[in-house]
Image (tube, rainbow, N blue to C red):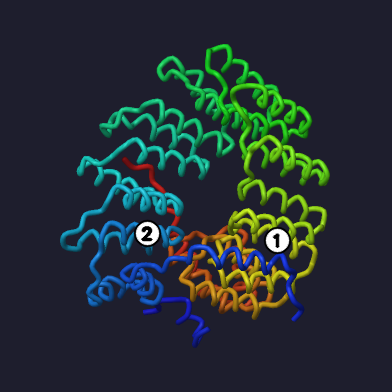
Amino acid sequence: MIKSVVDMLKINGCQKKLSLGWNVLARMCSSGETIKEIADPTKKICELMISCPKLGLDTSLSENGIRVSPAVVENVLKRFENAGMLAYQFFEWAGKQRNYEHSVRAYHTMIESLAKIRQYQIMWDLVNTMRSMKILNVETFCIIMRKYARSQKVEEAVYTFNIMEKYGVPPNLAAFNSLLSALCKSKNVVKAQEIFDGMKDRFIPDSKTYSILLEGWGKSPNLPKAREIFREMVDMGCNPDIVTYGIMVDILCKAGRVDEAVGIVKEMDSSVCKPTSFVYSVLVHTYGIENRIEDAVDMFLDMERNGIEADVAVYNALIGAFCKVNKLKNAYRVLNEMDCKGIRPNSRTCNILLNSLISCGDTDEAYRVFRRMIKVWDPDADTYTMMIKMFCQNDELEMALKVWKYMRLKQFVPGMHTFSVLINGLCKKGNVSKACVLLEEMMEKGIRPSSVTFGMLKQLLIKEGREDVLEFLREKMNLLVKEPLCD
């Protein structure tokens, strides 16, 4: 019997110096706290999960004499959060081990992973198990509401809120706020407002409730409605806090009213509620987007004059502003200043630099930055996706595969976007065999490919007369789209 697309296709397997700024960046990252090694049991489990065939994983885990603890299981599940079904297989195995019981955190991580790949039946099975163990809490339902809303399953998100009582977890203001937040963040603010209007007598709104709606209307974008919510908040006796002011500044900036936003910050300076570094990062970022680099720098200096210490988010905004106007030397000077003040950059800092270099067409320099980056910290999903996409677009497929190989070596589990950029690159190059292998691997991990990616591969398979392979992949994908609403 054919077990994989590999069998069907019979595939046998698959100096210019950087500026001072980057050297400083490397020193800053390497001179600080050394990246902690993963504990041995976790590392061993991850190696087995990546290298072992799906059918033999349970046996391999058992034969290696691995003893699990709540911390180890939580770490492994977090590591494989983008590979829901593989994570679930480990979750099931771990649950059968002697002297071990899943923690609430392990259940929550697993529920998130399953919801991400729309395996709702299994997700609700876990909820029922938690109910029988009497470990359900409000956060369990908040996670499910967020995931449903993110998948644009609005009715299901509301349904989850409504059945909390049935599961012995009475909904409270925190759950109400979580539902509104989930809907607003998924661009369903009209529904959120409708629910708020119908339930605000049952759950007395606080400043967080109003801030959630304020942000929702701001993202809509609907500035008049956002102003209306702000006024209602004040009229109801809810004093705006620093979060509310931060959201209002962000809304105004995104609406192109940065000068009005600055006015609010000045008002805050004279009130009890002082602006934070987050508020200033929004203003600096907005000035950067508008190519108002002098204003971005002035705002940064104003913040320092007001006695507010810059954090990595503000520095990232300033670096981004300089990159936006192609002033990379200035961006590197900001890195020098961060070094002097002992502020460590994060992966976002490097991604801003990489994105700027790639946008300018300086791909060689971007690759040099990437190579130095991986010596001092682990790249994130955005980094890998950016680099693989860059090489694919430049028709350097071998380099893209090299980055992919390094990513696998680091035991980083790619998500849908990272898989997609490489599969799309392989399709454009006509490498159908390798693209099929990756698509199958993607689905084996429980990740459903996008319609664009699957459609691209479908056309190539039809063109080559491989309808048998296409049907095989279709059947595999159909196993991922069962999404009953079960409780």
| Residue 440 in picture, x, y percent from top left | 48, 70
Left or right, 365 with respect to 85, comes to right
Q: Please give the name of the residue rendered at 74% of the width and 76% of the height, measured from the top-left corner.
A: 17
Can you tell which mark lies on residue 385? none
Three-letter amino acid code at the position of disc 2 = Leu
**Figure quadrant of residue 79:** bottom left
**Figure quadrant of residue 88:** bottom left
Whichever of labels 2 and 1 marks the residue nearer the N terminus, that label is 2
Q: CA distance from mark 2 to mark 1?
A: 31 Å
**Residue hosting label 2:** 77
Three-letter amino acid code at the position of disc 1 = Leu
| Residue 313 in picture, x, y percent from top left | 62, 48
Left or right, 79 with respect to 184, comes to left
Q: Comparing marks 2 and 1, which lies closer to the viewer?
A: 1
Q: Please give the name of the residue rendered at 53% of the width and 83% of the height, measured from the top-left corner.
A: 14
Q: Quadrant of the N terminus?
A: bottom left
State whether residue 125 appears in this view: no
Q: Please give the name of the residue rendered at 56% of the width and 27% of the height, measured from the top-left corner.
A: 211
SS state under label 1: helix
**Residue hosting label 1:** 353
| 36 shown above or below 395 | above
State whether residue 138 appears in this view: yes
Q: Please give the name of the residue rendered at 54% of the width and 28% of the height, measured from the top-left corner.
A: 191
